Amino acid sequence: MQDEQSQELAALELLWGLREPSSFGPRRALTVQQLAEVCVRLADTEGLNAVAMQRVAQELNYTKMSLYRYVRNKAELIAVMTDLAIGAPPDLGPPEDGWRTRIDRWIRGIRATWQQHPWLPYVSEWQGHAGAIRPVAGDRPMGPNEVGWVEAAVAAFEDTPLTARERMDCVFLLSAHLRSTHAMTTAGVLPWTLDVPQDPLLDRLRDSFGSSYPALTALAASAAEPDHDAFTFGLERVLDGIELLITRR
């Protein structure tokens, strides 16, 4: 446990620029930024499994051991590439635009980033420990970009009567909606969903077992709503609930 905590703190030092550069060996020719850029490119084109110390070293024409002068382990490699891919926190616009508009920009910005880097949701968990808010989530260190995104979302509620804790809870709630709708489009194949391609095997499944799932069978038989967006539908309902709370206050 102590060793894990030490590694976590060491990764935080790296992410936040607090680690003193090593004076051992020849003068450094690489930067952590360059390492992260290679990792992001590999993950974007080949998937997260392609990110390994040996592979990154080959891409940079360096030895694997030489990379350990910049990052101490793969966890640190993942941490720096995650913060780079997340990118700088957004400008959500002036307070006059209203909290709802600003939050909508925030969550759609995250969604666009996830679409650009499909591996990102699997290494970035927008969760928090009980008690004080720390730049550490799910035993994974968070860098300045990721913390900046959380800061932007919480600040969007600053002109509302919500308490500080409630503002953070709203951010968690919105993040959970984003994650759940993302998971619905990436995990599993439901033969009764409207957007599944036609296939004889799926037709046979529906014919054989459709009576056991009457609600889903009726859904699959109905015409798809062309303008329906599950993400936007859920987002509007979550924002409606938050707005109701603010109005009551």
Image: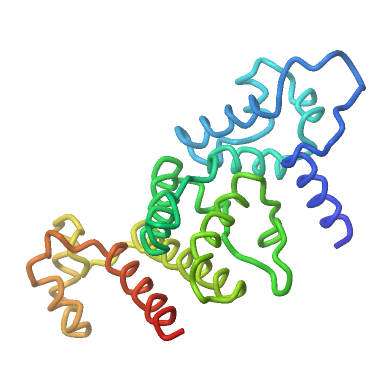
Left or right, 194 with respect to 241, comes to left
> In this view of the protein, which residue sits in the foreground, 112 or 159?
159
Residue 249 in the image: state x and y as whole percent: 46, 84
Q: Quadrant of residue 14?
A: top right
x and y percentages locating residue 80 in the rendered image: 66, 39
* Quarter residue 216 falls in: bottom left
Horizontal side, residue 200 vs residue 107: left or right: left
Q: Give the side of residue 225 with respect to residue 85, left or right.
A: left
The residue at 12%/65% (across/down) is 225
Q: Is residue 116 above or below residue 97?
A: above
The picture places residue 219, in percent across and down from the top left corner, at 15, 75
- Residue at far right of view: 24
Colour convention of the picture: rainbow
The residue under the point 60% across, 44% down is 145
| 69 up-or-down from 175: above or below | above
**Percent position of residue 160, x then y:** 49, 71
* Camera-nearest residue between 202 and 16: 16
Residue 168 lies left or right of residue 179; in this view the side is right
Q: Residue at x 82, y 45 (%)?
A: 10
Instruction: Give the residue at x 64% y 35%.
Output: 52
Residue 23, quarter of picture? top right
Q: Is residue 90 above or below residue 30?
A: below
Viewer-proximal residue among 172 and 159: 159
